[in-house]
Amino acid sequence: MTPMTKRIALVGSAALVLAVVGVGYSLFAVNRDGAPSHAEAAVAPATDAGLYVRGTDGYVVQQDGQDRSGTGLECSRFYAAADTAVCVSIEGSLKPTTTVSVRDADLTEEQTFTYSGVPSRARVSPSGRMVAWTVFVTGDNYAGTNFSTRTGMYDREKDFLVDSIEGLQLFIDGQRVHRVDANYWGVTFTDDDNTFYATVSTGGKTYLVQGDYEKWTAHTVRENLECPSLSPDGTRLVFKKRVNDSVDDPWRLYVLDLATMEEEPLAEDRNVDDQAAWLDDETVAYAVGDDVWSVPADGSGKPVRIAENASSPVMVSR
């Protein structure tokens, strides 16, 4: 497969949250309470620059200040980078089915993959080549112990699908281990399309792993680090850290410096069960409750609500 011309990529400045031009083909109007309402219209031909979120009605919109413009995509999770977007959606309730739709820069569907379970996470590598997603096979959250995940990975360049990355050769503290209870989730890619980070749960512990796509290996880096997300400059990971055993309030957001391996708590004292996204090298965004918030990545400042009635934030640009 030949990569297409680059049209969407991670943004390098949070200023675009307020300054970006709208998509144009608007599918949404904003109600007085801030919630989007879907209107009958054609699908927007491509993603434009700006912040994208999932509205409470399930549709992905571009958020420009208080205004919203639509993409026509109905997703449980959405992410985009370079010339690739991924929309992960769900059908059914008693026996839910997840569909992973890989799309190009014009939001034209290229590939679909279907799994049993509930959508959880989705990511695209900075170049747009690699796509990853996580589905809850059993259970519906990470707070308890009674859950199982299935994380897949797709290489657009080679048109190669890995249904589950549980076959990775896992090394804990440098020792090769074989663990039937290993669950992976929350993949994030570096810009070389080979190295990635993820969470693995095994033996009652969670670890950050550094994966090698070509060697198909995963080496543990640190304990108690979940849902990592790599900064645009590749130097830090924002993640959620379990700070207590509460089922309702277990996690806080931290940033890990990969050079020093020092971690910094962020100025968000609420529980965050999300794979945070970077707006730029200095700011992260995440969902709490029914809204999307941002906070500085250095531990300073305070949370700012940037999108009401929304989740699954991602910053994209031409």
Image (cartoon, grey):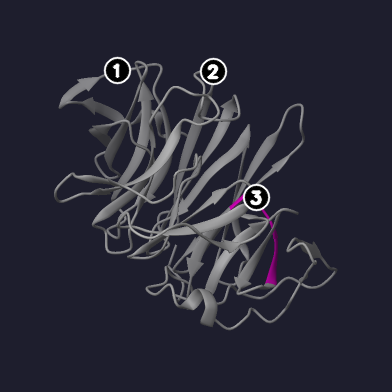
2 or 1: tag closer to the N-terminus = 2
Who's the residue at 66% across and 76% down the image?
45
Indicate the secondary structure of the residue bearing disc 3.
loop
Foreground: disc 2 or disc 1: 2
Q: Residues within 10 Å of mark 2 (few under 14, many from 20)?
A: few
Q: Give the CA distance from mark 2 to mark 3.
A: 25 Å
Q: Residues within 10 Å of mark 3 (few under 14, many from 20)?
A: few
The label on residue 146 is 2
Instruction: State if disc 3 and disc 2 touch (CB < 8 Å).
Output: no
Q: Indicate left or right for 197 with 15 as reference.
A: left
Question: Would you name the residue on which mark 1 appears?
Answer: 178
Question: Would you name the residue on which mark 3 appears?
Answer: 290
Three-letter residue code for mark 3: Asp
Question: Picture coordinates of residue 313 (x, y %)?
Answer: 54, 58
Q: Nearer the viewer, residue 63 or 114?
A: 63
Is residue 163 placed above or below 70 in the rendered structure?
above
Foreground: disc 3 or disc 1: 3
- Residue 250 is inside the magenta segment: no
Three-letter residue code for mark 2: Asn
Q: Give the CA distance from mark 3 to mark 1.
A: 40 Å
3 or 1: tag closer to the N-terminus = 1
Question: Picture coordinates of residue 13 (x, y %)?
Answer: 39, 75
Who's the residue at 84% across and 68% down the image?
39
Three-letter residue code for mark 1: His
The quadrant in which residue 277 appears is: bottom left
Is residue 283 placed above or below 205 in the rendered structure?
below
Q: Which residues are magenta?
A: 69-77
Who's the residue at 27% across and 45% down the image?
214
Q: Residues within 10 Å of mark 1 (few under 14, many from 20)?
A: few
The label on residue 33 is none
Q: Nearer the viewer, residue 54 or 91?
A: 54
